[in-house]
Structures are given as C-alpha cells and as structure tokens.
Amino acid sequence: MPTRNNWHIGRTMEYPYDGPPPKRQVAYIFDTNKCIACQTCTVACKTAWTSGKGEETIFWNNVETRPYGGYPAAWDLRTLEQMPPAQWQGRKLVSLTVIEAGGPDRPPLGHMPQAQDYAHPNLGEDDIAGAVNLGHHFSGTHPMWMFYLARICNHCDHPACLAACPRKAIYKRQEDGIVLVDQERCRGYQECIRACPYKKVFFNTITRASQKCIGCFPRVEQGEVALCVESCIGKIRMHGFLTTDGEPREDNPLDYIVRIRRLALPIYPQFGTGPNVYYIPPVHVPDAFLEQIFGPGIEEARRMYHNLADDKQLLGALLLFGATNRIITRFEVQGEEAVGWDVDGKEVARVPFTEPLYLRPHHDTRHGVYRHNTA
Amino acid sequence: MSKSPNTPLFVAMVVCVLLVAGVMTVAVFLAGQKPIVVVLPQTSAPVVQGLPAAPMTPVASGSLAAPATPAPAPPQVVVARVAAVPALDDVFSSVWEAVPVVPVPLQPQQTAAPMLEHATIESISVQAARDDRRIAWRLSWPAARPSSSVDTGQFADAVAIQLPMVDGAPFTMGAKDMPVRLLHWRALWQRDIDKGFQDVQDLYPNAWADLYWFTNGLRIDKSYVTGPARQFMPALAAGNPMIQLDRRSPVEELVAEGFGTATHVPDSPSNGRGVWKDGRWTVVLDRPLDKADRLVARLLSSDTNLISFAVWDGAAGNRGGQKHYCTWIPLRIEP
C-alpha cells in the first residue's frame, strides 16, 4: 500500500491510492463559540441540494449538540468504540487510524448505520453535560456545558469513503480537492457509508445510489463560498483553500488560521482521513472532551482565542468570516481594517476592527416624534 | 556473467509465488470449510495460459491441499434440450422437473476487498434448458425470508451467472482484455416489477413531504422523470442504471474486466423471474438464442463452455463483492 504524509497526525500512513495532492485544498473553518444552532445552514443546503425524493432524511449539513447529540445517531461513538483510545506523542499520533485499523487489504474500519439512525437529526439538542442540581450557581466557569457542532463533509485529504469504494466511483478533484460520488457509476453498495467515519455519505433509497456533500462545487468554480457558509447568520464560517503546493502563506486566511497559528483544529484527527473542516474549539468545554474530538492543541487554541484583542493579525482574519460571498484567497490588516481579496485579485471585503457608532437622539425633530429602541 | 547472481533470486521468487499460492488456497479452503471445486476446463485451448497471479484464479493444480473428506465429483451444468423452455410466469413448470438438478457448492468471496467474512449459503441448485429460440437457467437456494428492498444498511437478495467472453478469462470477474458477461437478478428489481417501483411510502407508509418540486404528487409518477423534476434525483439525471422507474426486466446484464469494473449493458435481451416460496428463492434467467449476439455465438460454437454462479444473502449484508461464489464449472449445451 502506498504511504502518504498526513500532517494532522504528524506522520506518514498507508492509504490504498497514491497521487499528488490537489492543486489547492478546499477547507472550512467553523467557530464553535459563535454557533447558535439556528440551522439556517442546514436549511440552505437542504433546499438547494437534497429536497428530492429519496433524500428526506439526508442532511449534508447538520448542526448537532455536544455531548449528547449526533446525526446519524452516535456516528462517532460507534467508530470510537471499535478503536483503542487515540494516543498522541505531542502532535504525533502513535495509535492506528481507521484506514490502518481496518487491516492490510481490508476496507477502513467502520460501521454501517441503519435507516432509523437518520430519523432524529435533533436528538440530544440543547442537552447539557450534566444535571443542574439544587444549589448550583455560577462561580467562574459554569460546570454544565454543551456546544453546537456544525458538520458537513470534510473533503478529506485521504478519504475513507474513496478508499472503501470497490468500484472507484468516488474521486477527489485535482483542482480543489472536493470529494465527489460519481452519480452514474455508483451501484449502491454502501461501502462508503460504512467506511466514512464522519457518516457524511448517504444512501438515497429512490435512486439507490450514495450521495454526499458536493462542496457547492458549481459555486466554488465561480469563486463563491458554499451555501452553508453564505447563509450563516452568525458568521461562524470561513470557506477557502489551503495551500498544497508549498509552504502555508501568511496572507491566506485559511493557511494562517489553520496551519500557521493552529487556532482551528481538525475534527477527530485520529481517524487519519485528513478532514478539512477545522473547528475553533469552544472555550468553555473541558479539555478531555475536546481533545478526544479535536486532538492536541486545545489549550493553545483557547489561549489564542482569549487573547484575540491583542492579536491583530489573527483577529483580522477572523473578522473576515461571513464578510463576503466571495472566497477570500488573500487578506491583509491595513490600519484599523481587515481587507480580503478574491481569486481574481478583486477586493471583496473591508471590515473595521471597531464598528462605527451612530447615536440617534431620543427626539426626532424632523418628524416631531420620540424614538423608541424598538423602532 | 550477470545471469548467475540472478538465478537464486529467480528461484526465490518462484518459491515465494508458490508459497503465497499455497497459503492463499489453504486460507480460502479453511474459510469456506468445504472442498474447493477445482475444474479443468475441457476445451483444447490452454485456458490457464496468460492468467495473472495464481492466487487470484484457483485452477487445477496438484499443489492444492487435499481435503480431509473426499471431494465431490466436480459438477457440470448440462443445458438440456427441451421442446419448449417454460414461460417465465411459470418458474415451477413441470418441464423443469425433467431437467437434472446440479448442486453447486459456494464459498464466500475472500479474494478481493471487501470480502465476505461469513458464509450463510452453502450451495445453489442449478438447472438449465434450451429450445430453438431460448436458453434458460433455473437457480434455487434457501432464504429463510426474502430480502427484497433496500435502504441504508439494508440489501436485497440476488443471484448472478457469469460467462467468459474469451478463453482464459478468470472467474474472478474477468481481467483486462479478458471480459466476462454477467446476468444479474435482484430481488429488489423483481419487487419493482411485481409491485411497482419501491417508493418511499412503501418503505415508510406514514412518510410525508410538503412538496417534491415540479411533480404532480407525493407518489412517484411520470412527472418525476420528465421535465425539471428529474434534476432532483441526481443519479437518475446522470443516467445511472440503478434507478429505472419503469423497469421491464429483473435481470441486468453486465460486462467486467476485473474487480470493480462491472458495467451495465444497456438494452440487453435477458429477462427472468424470481419467486420466493417455502423458504427458497427460485429464479429463472432467460435469454434469447439470437445467433447474431456475441455471447450466444460463443455459447453455441463450442459444446464445452464455462459458467460460474454468485449468490447474495441480502439479510446478511451481502452486496457487491461480498457474495458467495464458485469457480468456473463446465457448461455443456445439448445441441
């Protein structure tokens, strides 16, 4: 089996296929601290891509509550329980990935969900980690916690779905690393559904073929961000490209946040598929829980997030979240503004560090009325 | 000068290949827990010539492990000449009672990933008959309950026959430039024909949706296929043969040139019918003997052909390469 470098786990690993990395890798950053689980992303995606017959319970984008939520039910726990606990030496994973744990000449380790596992996408929503007992009160950090985890296909560097498909009906695009299921070639064996550790490949009962998030590739080809990113009212998401043909670039917001500063972390890096949705971890959740989901680097990420006010370059990159429908490929902090340019070199976002303040007098002299703050 | 250092290397390689072949054969044998059916094709052409790695194609060889129990006589499928092949709507026709039944042992596919870990079906009963115009195979195997629908994690029962299109094609789905032809029946497609295309409401009677864009209603009808509604079913719009809302035959023909290459043959003439009764599937695969057809021409040009079978136990999660199968078996067509 060919060997590939996986920077998420700080080592090489075996993967059934060799090949050069894509010219650039589509990637996303989700700030979990800002997500309110309004599901606007979910609905935007569903309306655009999966409103057809047979797609009733398919959500390419979903937002679940941690620790108890999960769609499909217990998608991660059922994989985790088959593996020994992840073991890290610093940033190097010494335990096996799902690709390796499957065994030589075997598909990746996985589990096959059942139809009913997709029936309750909001299971566990807003449930907190423990009971609030009589006498509990705030002192420092609230002992009960939960957070929202927005999920889409990770368009992995080393996709388990692709590795598992016996027909080679899944492919990773050379131009942007988007992973797609060939809708003409798929015969519905569901090996990808079993293998994807994130359970982001779905079976369409009507077309009898597997389907997955297409990364809004028709939009990406036009330089536009994905619909789940554009529709996010909390501006928690950034969509762009990671550099694959050289060193990470300081002026690429994705490179800067993910590779250079490591503020955003991959989800379940121990699975070894190289997922490309990166999460800024929630600041209020116990480390042990976060380390299981996001791997090493939790404490540094939290410290960075707390110090953002004094970290102008990093804050500038974060200010560009949700600032434009165009994919930002270059950014710069200019004085008191963060500026973003798209792939055509056109300025598409200019965001001030401090929003201008407008004071409106209580009495409107022109109309002779008093303003209310609900007006 | 340069040859002598290579000789030990060559010998070592040969020993390694033989060793691997032996180990693989024993492993397949142990996993199957039954004697491997080894068939020496009776054609005069050396069909094993040019085959790829030996482990991929267990052909006759003295190196095969001798089973503890005596091996059954290698089966042979004889296509009996009958006055008229029974009509498809009568899979239990008395004509079939006069046709010999050949039990063919099956083993779990454990050559290529994804492998079938556990066998649940031991053998398939095979009959074959022909008249002047048609050739048919009647296949039967036990199934406690029929699995006729698909959903996430749910698979349908199925059966297939495989026929080489050239001499020497390996039984493992053929190989590059050595294609095989498959006739593949699925219980799901039979269900589509018997009861209409399996709709969401057939799986979930209380399923409701406010609207499916550009359609006439919640149940699948023509409006789903024509016009803009079509694009809301991506595999349909892409021309994937897996979705056929007006399926006419429960049998699909495929060509293959190796693992993972099985490709749908459009407008193939195969037909068939499967009936589940008293804990068994009985499936008839039926094909016109059109001599202009390459497959038929090949079948009729020689009185010794090869055939192999595959059975999928849907309830046990069988699909794709996770199947029960057998090596080539001689197929003799009575003139």
Image (cartoon, coloured by chain):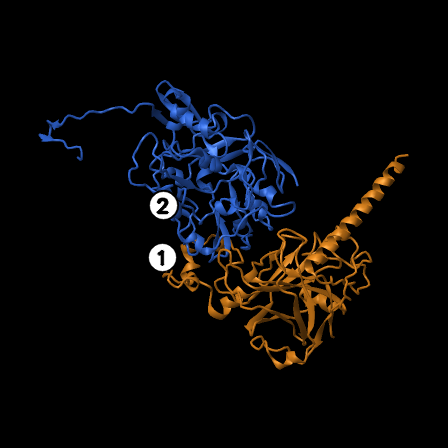
Chain colours: A blue, B orange
Q: Are marks 1 and 2 on the same chain?
A: no
Amino acid at dot 1: Ala
The picture places residue B69, in percent across and down from the top left corner, at 76, 65
Between residues A193 and B209, which one lies in front from this camera angle? A193
| Residue at 58% from the left image edge and 75% from the top image edge | B88
Q: Quadrant of residue A224?
A: top left
Residue B240 visible: yes
Crowd rating for badge 1 (residues with CA inside 10 Å; few <14, some 14–19, many 20+): few
Residue B209, label in figure: 1
Between residues A7 and A130, which one lies in front from this camera angle? A130
- Mark 1 to mark 2 CA distance (whole Å): 23 Å
Residue B289 visible: no
Q: Chain of mark 2?
A: A
Left or right: residue A233 versus residue B236 is left
Quadrant in which the N terminus of chain A is drawn: top right
Q: Quadrant of residue A236?
A: top left
Label 1's element? Answer: loop
The picture places residue B105, in percent across and down from the top left corner, at 69, 66
Q: Which residue is mark 2?
A: A125
Q: Foreground mark, 1 or 2? A: 2
The picture places residue A298, in percent across and down from the top left corner, at 46, 30
Left or right: residue A370 versus residue B210 is left
Amino acid at dot 2: Glu
